[in-house]
Amino acid sequence: MIIKWLLVPALVMAVWLSLRSRASLRGQARRKMLAGGTVVVGVLAVIFPDATQWAADAVGVTRGTDLLLYVLALVLIYLVGSTSVRFREQEARLVRLSRQLALAETEARIGLGVTPGYGPHGRAAPGDDAARAALK
């Protein structure tokens, strides 16, 4: 069965590609090409349903629908891994932004002569403990 020799490397490649960083232009182009290719293959499978059976026979799968299921599983694995990486990167950006904002607020309070850690009425402002620790 040829399909076994095709699916195993495709699975490894889908996982490897999905877990790479998303910041590069090459990665963005690859994702757009994959999306476009998926749409083209889907349209062709709808227009020419016998082609899926022919492709399934060529790789040793009994039915064309099974082949489509295998391909769909690969795309789904890629999308899950890619989405996980994207959320992780967004979370890291949000943490950096929050830290920069806390430092900027603390620097502004120092510039205005307000004691760090205290609001305008002499009470501790929420979240100032982290800002004070960052200034040390």
Image (cartoon, rainbow, N blue to C red):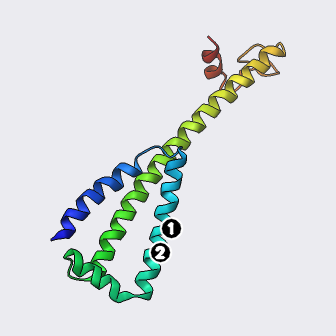
Q: Position of residue 96 (x, y in %)?
A: 60, 32
Q: Position of residue 43 (x, y in %)?
A: 47, 80
Position of 133 compared to 85: left or right?
A: right
**In the image, farthest residue toward the top:** 136
**Residue 43 against residue 129 in the figure, above or below:** below
Local crowd at mark 2 within 10 Å, few (<14), some, or many (≥20)? few
**Residue 34 against residue 134 in the figure, above or below:** below
Position of 44 compared to 74: left or right?
A: right
Q: Position of residue 86 (x, y in %)?
A: 50, 48
Q: Which mark is residue 36?
A: 1
Q: Which mark is residue 130?
A: none
**Residue 11 against residue 3 in the figure, above or below:** above
Residue at figure coordinates x 55%, y 47% from the top left: 25
Residue at figure coordinates x 43%, y 85% from the top left: 46
**In the image, farthest residue toward the left:** 1
- Image quadrant assignment for residue 128: top right
Q: Is disc 2 placed on a helix, strand or loop?
A: helix
Position of 45 compared to 27: left or right?
A: left
Residue at figure coordinates x 39%, y 64% from the top left: 75
In this view, the residue in front, 30 or 136, is: 30
Residue at figure coordinates x 47%, y 75% from the top left: 40
Q: Quadrant of the N terminus?
A: bottom left
The amino acid type found where label 2 is placed reads Val
Q: Is residue 66 visible?
A: yes
The amino acid type found where label 1 is placed reads Gly
Local crowd at mark 1 within 10 Å, few (<14), some, or many (≥20)? few
CB-based contact (under 8 Å), mark 1 and mark 2? yes
In this view, the residue in front, 88 or 30, is: 30
- Residue tagged by mark 2? 40
Q: Is disc 1 placed on a helix, strand or loop?
A: helix
Q: Position of residue 20 (x, y in %)?
A: 42, 45
